Image: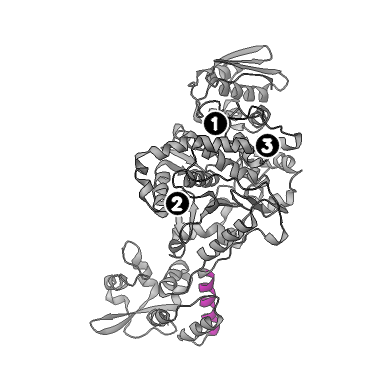
Amino acid sequence: MYAMNKIPTITDDQLEKYSSAISLSDMEIFVFPELLYSLVLANMMSPRIWEWKNHDWFRKLDNMSPYKKIQRLKQFIIDNYEFNLDLDTWGLTTKQSEIERFSPYMDEKTISRSNALFGYEGDKHYFSLDIRKHFGLDKYTSNIIPFWKTETLEAMDAFKFKDEYRVGAGECVSLSTLYAAALFIVCDIPLEDIFLLATPLHSQNFVNVNEGILTNNRRLVTKNMWFNGTDLTAKAQRALRNEQVTIVANNTGYIHTVYPEATISPKSFETFRQKLDEFTTSEITFEIIANFLRDRSEYQKCFQIRYMRHGKAQYLPIERAFAYEHGSPYKVSDDATRDKLLEEIDEYDFYTEPIADRILLNKLSDYLRNNPISHFDEKSMTELAETIDCTNDMSRKMSVIEGLIDFIHLEPELPDVGSKQFAGPGPISIKPGMTREEIIHYLEGLRETHMIADLAFYAYRDLAVTDWKPFLKAALERNPVITEATNTLSDRELIEILQALPNESIYGGSRVAQPDEVWNFQRGDGLERAIALADAWKQRHTNDPIHLESSEGRVTLMMGETEVVFESFKGLTKSIDL
């Protein structure tokens, strides 16, 4: 399948980046932004994702519109993957060791300002939510912090082998990169229309289909949903409303808020910026105002709604109407069902006269039906303020209007293009309709000149076509779970328990799992279990020389005077000192 016999050379100053393509922690992706799209490409190369195309769930997909295809994909992901936010999944490291690793690339102040594991709190909104407690980060107050790792598709699928997991799982970066690969392979969405967005606390995608679609963990957010004012949407908006977008990436490259160089096509980034701006902007209509009040409940006390009962006008505090929405199929914002909702409300909740100092929503509705308003039009906003005639308190009026403007228009904090130098190796020109084999062959041809393509093979974990040094560096330095889990076992017990694990790899062919994947999913090919044993042994016997011999069907591990033999089906030949 691979056309290239020679593996591109990795220089000493690149080794940290290439080994990070194996471990793929969120911190590593933040420091080395090339890794984000490399994982997308690794998932695109995976035979596992191509099998989805033959699944019954995607039968007759070719007859569907792009949006229907994406909806179909969303349900498949919801059914087969859970959102995993267990920070202990991949073990612990220390702030000091991570800062030392990355000091050649980024200073400690920048890391602390931009990364949740180093004290990042987000803006005042996140601070009020105590976001570190929400994510379980509050318990990491010392030098000890978790590895917050991203999973490949195979590792996501392997969560079903863990206790308490019913199906596969992954954290937000895992899900966003999985979505990006699947949108292209299953739904035939061009790579040019799929943008990955990373913030310090979240990762999601913007898909340029119809008015735009945001992926948010397992779910999707359309423009209509963005403005529906529900709790679910408010949570989906949280990252873009309250965080700096640190990385934007697509097939043309990336832009990073910290680094002065950007490789993304300026034209592609401008298209993304404009489309995202349109997605997060709406005209002011009655429906939008009602959705605004649903979302910003603090303003509900300023509004009332009129309802005609038996030919007589009655007036209801709007917060009572929203309270009745819970458990009802009818909505205040829906012209077709609003009266049905009001009909359900007890007559004792209504007033017979207009409620003093409250804006009449019906009057606004009549005005907006004939005067749709854009927040860019100052004259229209002034006329709207004059329409709100419930009170002479202009500060109260302006408070409502300012809140409404904030609701109907969000300008995400994107990387500043004005300070960037745009230069890159060019786009990765993979087109819908290409086969898996064609894609791999194409990426193989780019490896010498395109680092993201080369890194993709490391994220893909194929030791037949990659240098082993990055894989082994990651294996011996960043797999603390197996060490911690086995530290009370004797040497003999450690060997026996790894020899007894099922000889089953979560990866096919010559692709190889890391030690903590072997331990977390309690299975591994003999080569994988030998490397896992070497990792655990190295931590307890730091001075023992370790030598690994891998040949067809057999792996021999020499650890000091101890020899251990495993059966292997990876077909890899190697003789190496660890």
Residue 475 falls inside the magenta stretch: no
Q: Report which residue position mark 1 lands on.
A: 517
| C-alpha separation, residue under disc 3 versus residue under disc 1 | 30 Å
- Between label 3 and label 2, give the one nearer the viewer: 3
Q: Report which residue position mark 3 lands on.
A: 448
Label 1: how many Cα within 10 Å (few below 14, some 14–19, many 20+): many
x and y, in percent, of residue 129 in the image: 55, 58
x and y, in percent, of residue 219 in the image: 45, 51
Residue 395 falls inside the magenta stretch: yes
- Total count of labels: 3
Foreground of the two, 492 or 370: 370
**Residue 51 in view (yes/no):** yes
Q: Residue at x 39, y 48 (%)?
A: 72
Which range is magenta? 394-406
Residue type of the residue flagged with mark 3? Glu
Label 3: how many Cα within 10 Å (few below 14, some 14–19, many 20+): some
Please say if 118 is above or below 168. Answer: below
- Between label 3 and label 1, give the one nearer the viewer: 3
Q: Report which residue position mark 2 lands on.
A: 219
Callout 2 secondary element: strand
